[in-house]
Image (cartoon, rainbow, N blue to C red):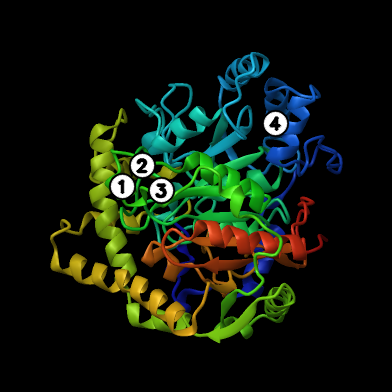
Amino acid sequence: MNRRSFIKASSVVSVSTTLAACSSSETAKTDDKSTPFTDNFALNELTIHDLQQKMQAGEYTSESLTQLYLDRIDAIDKKGPRLNAVIETNPDALTMAKALDGERKAGKLRGPMHGIPVLVKDNIDTGDQMMMTTAGSLALEGHKAAQDAFVVAQLRKAGAVILGKTNLSEWANFRSSRSCSGWSSRGGQTRNPYVLDRNPSGSSSGSGSATSANLCAVAVGTETDGSIIAPSSHCGLVGLKPTVGLVSRSGIIPISHTQDTAGPMTRTVTDAAILLGALVGVDPADAVTLESRGKSVTDYTQFLKANALTGKRIGIEKSFLTGHEGVVNLYKEAIETLKKQGATVVEIELMKELREMGGAEFTVLQYEFKDGLNRYLSKANAGVKSLADVIAFNRQNEAKAMPFFKQETLESSEAKGDLTSKEYTEALTKTRSWRQRIDKLMATHKLDAIGGTSIGFAGCIDLINGDYDTGFYFCPPAAMAGYPHLTVPMGTIHGLPVGFSLIAGAYQEGPLLAMAYAYEQASKKRERPTFVDSLVPRG
């Protein structure tokens, strides 16, 4: 999840202090032995449709595309700018691609994902025994899942090539109140491809950085509260957190059974629609997906129309009209684009109700994390079999496992009782009330969606003090409600991307993708990253 939602005002590190840390940070330097990086990658910004056309024309095969992406990972993830977004590549990727090329040659095409190289987050099980699943934790190093997560099985069925695993904020950013997003004890620190000493946000940090930097065609992230939306916003991507229940969570290392979901992280809305269609499905191992029966489709591109905003009513979060002038100006420009595309804009106030939640969401997540992780580990092939074992491992290996920040969130979760606790059930009632709050607001104003700034611009990487708040965080309402949330690029500030969000009621992914597509086509705000070292000039 994204830790931004739990940062308290009293613990916010000043921007000026952290800017100094950015300029001197060792983690932000590029390889001093390399010449200035020139990005002339042949597959830059190519979409799924572009890649399919090139394979159909015989210009590329899936095997050659896979090799190009593997070479790209070596060139700029492990060398050059050293993004550190990919925690491991798949030794079987080229073999998978070659087999899919054989199917293509024989006239068997599985769909639009056939032969497309995809990266998945390292909290998602891959059961081919070629890669580990560790949530970035040294406590799980060596763990190889017995079977694919349902979403990975869906990707294979759709013909995708599993290119590798992406780094993440360790334990999906549910380890410490002073964590630095994008850092894990197994994978180290992932960087933002726009400005290398800036944070890519978390917890799907690697999926965001890798997709933005064209290390893959598309990637899969996971979210509990902001972990798809925030890194997508920081990395200039389209990110979609689906309705909880649309995409299975079985085989994904959990935080919360009421809020967790996997979802697409892509460079275009069309690619997000294609990838979502490959991920959805009813899974008997995840009972909540039974609720999606008859509410999902396999082709979300059918919703994408350039005039989809015409006649729509969009609620605009009023509180985001004040704050950092650069972010506010981008937001106002996005609102004007909505109007020009035929939408009616209504100012609303949704975020002020967060104050009524107190610490309810964090309480819910602690209980559910302990319960879910114990269930997952009890059946896993890992050396640790419970949350208590993880805590003990970290203490015994503190120098490597906890060199910068500790594990107070793991410990506070372990101290919680079971899911029959009155504290848990009362907190859950509070968080689930967001469904009614959003539904009522949309009904009162006759809204098709609610829009807002996804999150402020990327802060600096600070392993000592941890993340700090740059404002405009729009993720908690849809996260607690289990409702869909989509972000699309709305511009940059000093080269740092900021996203525009749309949320709506349950299973409204099609209409949200349609409105986002219309906005994307009218605004064209996605910019390719340029791997700048720092915004602070050196010496």
Residue closest to the eye, 43 or 276 = 276
Q: Please tell me whether mark 1 or mark 4 is closer to you in this view.
A: 1
Measure the C-alpha gap from mark 3 to mark 1. 27 Å
Among numbered discs 4 and 3, the one appearing first in the sequence:
4
- The residue labelled by disc 3 is 171
Q: Which mark is residue 340?
A: none
Task: Kindly identify the amino acid type of the residue bearing the numbered disc 4.
Answer: Tyr
Around disc 1, counting alpha carbons within 10 Å, would you say few (fewer than 14), some (14 to 19), or many (20 or more)? some
- The residue labelled by disc 1 is 290
Residue, x 42% and y 34% (percent of image)?
133
Around disc 2, counting alpha carbons within 10 Å, would you say few (fewer than 14), some (14 to 19), or many (20 or more)? many
Q: Please tell me whether mark 3 or mark 1 is closer to you in this view.
A: 1
- The residue labelled by disc 4 is 69
Measure the C-alpha gap from mark 1 to mark 2. 6 Å
Q: Position of residue 443 (x, y in %)?
A: 43, 79
Label 2 near label 1: C-beta < 8 Å?
yes
Measure the C-alpha gap from mark 2 to mark 4. 31 Å
- The residue labelled by disc 2 is 282
Among numbered discs 3 and 2, the one appearing first in the sequence:
3
* Left or right: residue 222 compared with residue 192: left
